[in-house]
Amino acid sequence: MFDYYGIKWKRKREKILRLDGYKCQIAKRYGRTEEAVVVHHIYPADEYPEWAWCDWNLISVSLATHNQLENRKTGELTQMGLDLQRRTVPGVDWRKKRG
């Protein structure tokens, strides 16, 4: 199980939020501005531990968006979360694709 309470994650989380300007990157795709408070693993950390710390696998989102990306009771990705995963190529920095 991934440790979301350790100092290493807290530092990584802060780095990603700062990198994304504390803005929800999903809302941004739809022309909306929402504050990001959660860093989501596109490829879940427990299923893909080798990618748990990779910047390309982490995305800043609002709490509402995070709840749309994964089922909070089961931890499973929703259809929206699976769609995001399909659009994310492992090892490719999606942030550099933006124009």
Image (tube, rainbow, N blue to C red):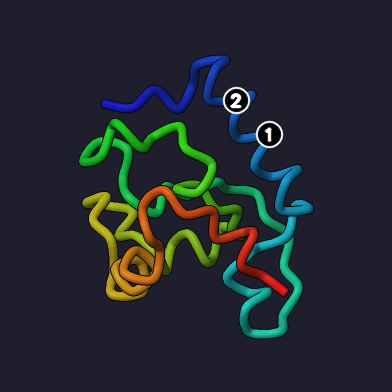
Q: Position of residue 98 (x, y in %)?
A: 67, 70
In this picture, is 86 found above or below 9?
below
Residue at the limit of the structure toward the top, as seen here: 7
Q: Position of residue 77 (x, y in %)?
A: 28, 61
Residue at the limit of the structure toward the bottom, as seen here: 30
Amino acid carrying label 2: it is Lys
Q: Residue at x 64, y 60 (%)?
A: 96
26 or 75, nearer to the observer: 26
Determine which quarter of the picture holds residue 26.
bottom right
Q: Residue at x 55, y 60 (%)?
A: 94
Q: Position of residue 97 (x, y in %)?
A: 61, 67
Please identify the quadrant where the N terminus is shown. top left
Q: Residue at x 59, y 58 (%)?
A: 61
Amino acid carrying label 1: it is Glu
The total number of labels drawn is 2
Label disc, if present, on residue 14 of the rendered structure:
1
Q: Residues within 10 Å of mark 2 (few under 14, many from 20)?
A: few
48 or 33, nearer to the observer: 48
Determine which quarter of the picture holds residue 70.
bottom left
Determine which quarter of the picture holds residue 76.
bottom left
Q: Residues within 10 Å of mark 1 (few under 14, many from 20)?
A: some
Q: Is residue 97 left or right of residue 22?
A: left
Q: Are marks 1 and 2 in contact (CB under 8 Å)?
A: yes
Tell me the element at label 1: helix
Q: Position of residue 29 (x, y in %)?
A: 62, 78
Q: Is residue 10 left or right of residue 92?
A: right
How far separated are the C-alphas under marks 1 and 2? 6 Å
In this picture, is 39 found above or below 86?
above
Q: Which residue is mark 2?
A: 10
